[in-house]
Amino acid sequence: MPELVVENIKKSFHGTAVLEDVNFTVADGEFFTLLGPSGCGKSTTLSCVAGLETPDSGTIRVGDQVFFDGTRRSTVPPEGRNLGLVFQSYALWPHMTVADNLALPLKLRKVTKGEQRRLIDDVLTKVDMAHLRDRYPHQLSGGQQQRVALARGIVYSPGVLLLDEPLSNLDAKMRDQARVWLKDLQREVGITTVYVTHDQVEAMSLSDRIAVFMHGHLQQVGTPTEIYETPATPEVAGFIGRCN
Ligand code: ADP
Ligand code: MG
């Protein structure tokens, strides 16, 4: 799996700076979390990596592939970026079964029918949903829908998985279970992951490293222990401590 490098990303909306010099590198197979309060720029950062937003300046690359080099001319479009995306709303197609929801990204990539079946069986087994392959989304619980959404994000073996608050629609008990399950899955698949959350407990329990994000700046990047024991600024200390 390739590493993801984000360098000096700036982004403004209507003259208001939302991202100011955002820099981070996510290593091969790492679980990297952008943690910060609502409105600090986490989703905008993921959208820039995914190509759904274009930064004003900076560079973004995965391995040797340059997604964005600071000029709009050479920007790689979202469909050329081989990323897995799972956002807060699961957005499964309601009129399609679980298996058909998973087949869609494979069809788009011109995977043969036989190979589609093999990949879908494989990923459904990984997320413990093989017995529900012919169900429709409304016949599943929130937690099961979330598993299908995650399965859809990894079924075509993307280079990097981008997860934007994927557990926030679950109730507290299910969120705890999903956290354990998500970590096991990421370990098993070993996929380079960028995870976005405003929840410090989630960040601390899932991440290899955390970037604490406030007002469009990364305040500190470190392991959960480093962030917890030696916060770099009073703001980081306040944010980490406030909800513990
Ligand atoms: P987070 O995900 O950390 O909650 P966002 O990245 O969604 O934060 O938003 C950061 C800031 O950028 C917010 O003030 C938000 O209102 C603003 N913003 C995000 N997307 C847009 C957009 N498309 N147009 C205008 N403002 C936006
Ligand atoms: Mg967000």
Image: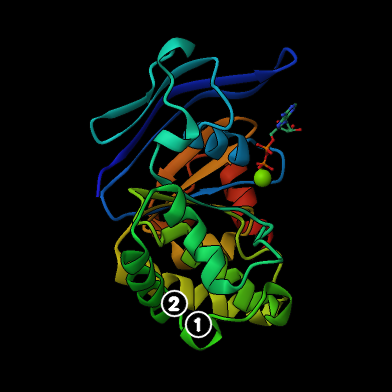
Report the colour scheme: rainbow
Q: Is residue 37 left or right of residue 7?
A: right
Q: Earlier in the sequence, mark 1 or mark 2?
A: 2
Where in the figure is residue 235, as x and y percent of width and height? 62, 41
User: In this orientation, which residue lies closer to the viewer: 243 or 11?
Assistant: 11
The yes-or-no answer for disc 2 within 8 Å of ligand 2 is no
The yes-or-no answer for disc 1 within 8 Å of ligand 2 is no
Give the crowd class for mark 2: few <14, some 14-19, many >=20 residues within 10 Å: many
Q: How many marks?
A: 2
Q: Which residue lies at the image location 40% right of the left edge and 15% below the top edge?
A: 74
* Amino acid type, callout 2: Leu
Pointer 2 residue: 124
* Amino acid type, callout 1: Met
The residues tagged by marks 1 and 2 sit, at their Cα atoms, a distance apart of 5 Å
Where in the figure is residue 227, as x and y percent of width and height? 45, 52
Q: Which residue lies at the image location 63% right of the left edge and 35% below the top edge?
A: 41
Q: Which residue lies at the image location 71% right of the left edge and 45% below the top edge?
A: 38
* Quadrant of the rendered image holding ligand 2: top right
Q: Secondary structure at mark 1?
A: loop
Looking at the image, residue 64 lies above or below residue 211: above
Where in the figure is residue 49, as x and y percent of width and height? 47, 35
Q: Which mark is residue 129?
A: 1
Q: Which residue lies at the image location 49% right of the left edge and 34% below the top edge?
A: 78
Q: Is residue 207 left or right of residue 240?
A: left
State if disc 2 and disc 1 touch (CB < 8 Å). Answer: yes
